[in-house]
Image (cartoon, rainbow, N blue to C red):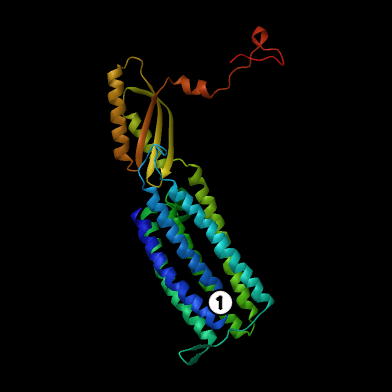
Amino acid sequence: MAESTGAIYTAAGANLAIAAAKFVGAFLTGSTAMLAEGAHSLVDTANQLLLLVGLKRAKKPADAKHPFGYGREVYFYAFIVALFIFLGGGIFAIYEGAHKIEHPEPAADATLFGVRLSGFWVNVSILGFAILAEGYSCLVAVRAFWAEKGERGAITAIQRSKDPALYTILVEDVAALIGLVIAMTGVVLAHLLDKPALDGWASIGIGLVLVGMSIFLMFETHGLLIGEAADPEVVRTIQAAVREEAAVQHVNAVLTQHLGPSDILVNLSLDFADDVPAGEVERTVARLESRIRAQSRHVTRVFIEIQSRKAPAAESAPAPAPTGSDAAPPGSAVPA
């Protein structure tokens, strides 16, 4: 998770500086789009701090209360981040934009250290600085994401990624750049066309981008929060490791679940040949555990269950309904 941590620190620093600049611009000029963008950057900064808290708490060792550790902490905090973006960024921007449309006012000129500055150029300068800073942060996030995704497409990589901290920062940065372009367009058009209401429409556009992004992040994080299986490539690697053992006649089931971005639980149900001695079964199980951990670096726990090939099917099949003399009459109690 080193890539995601580095991307978070870069994004947090950039967003803090951007938020300060935007709020100053909004205060000096009265631009609603600038205010919405300031709130967006402030929310992003808080989100990145929350992700860092989640990553730190996820490293806590297992204890009696949480025997499988705290790896899912990062999933919980990533979901909270998505909620913050929805409420603190998206809804706020839409509300402020609607207010500006109802009460349009041109960008006010600013006075700084006794020097009168054009409100329009103040906004353009700050947005230009924000685009450069956000662009650098986005570049760092893209490099970290590209290093993890391999040859997969971007959307597929996000859907299969088990590290929400990494793709959350990437999606946030991309949305921030889109929002900045919308804000710049709104400020410029409001000035050129002398229609201050366009500044409000830009704020609404920013809000809609944030709402869409937050819903996407909620959807992706939800699956991780309730438990997702490991990547199919990991499952295939486990199955290949089992096939190397001659004593194993059949693989009944390979069950995997991510307990954290780098913490995979594996449960195997295997059918051994009936003539294999107990000692050889133990040695085979030990070899399998070592081989699976060596080939899949994120596998931390391996549980192997020895079962007949027919047992799992029998356990999952519904019990036959009693008939004839075995059937209990309606309304009678069946003894436990």
Disc 1 residue crowd, few under 14, some 14–19, many 20+, Cα 10 Å: some
Image location (x, y in percent) of residue 69: 39, 41
Q: Is residue 85 above or below residue 79?
A: below
Image location (x, y in percent) of residue 299: 35, 40
Number of residue marks: 1
Q: Amino acid at mark 1?
A: Thr
Q: Is residue 244 above or below residue 187?
A: above
Who is closer to the viewer here, 283 or 92?
92
Q: Residue at x 58, y 22 (%)?
A: 318
Q: Could you tell me if residue 161 is visible in this image? A: no
Image location (x, y in percent) of residue 156: 47, 51
In-image side of 165 versus 95 (left or right): left
Q: Residue at x 27, y 25 (%)?
A: 283
Which residue is label 1 attached to?
185
Q: Secondary structure at mark 1?
A: helix
Q: Residue at x 45, y 48 (%)?
A: 160
Give the image quarter of residue 289. top left
Give the image quarter of residue 197. bottom right
Q: Residue furthest right?
A: 330
Q: Is residue 242 above or below residue 166?
A: above
Q: Residue at x 63, y 68 (%)?
A: 95
Q: Residue furthest top?
A: 325
In-image side of 192 versus 247 (left or right): right
Image location (x, y in percent) of residue 44: 48, 64
Q: Quadrant of the C terminus?
A: top right
Q: Could you tell me if residue 190 is visible in this image? A: yes
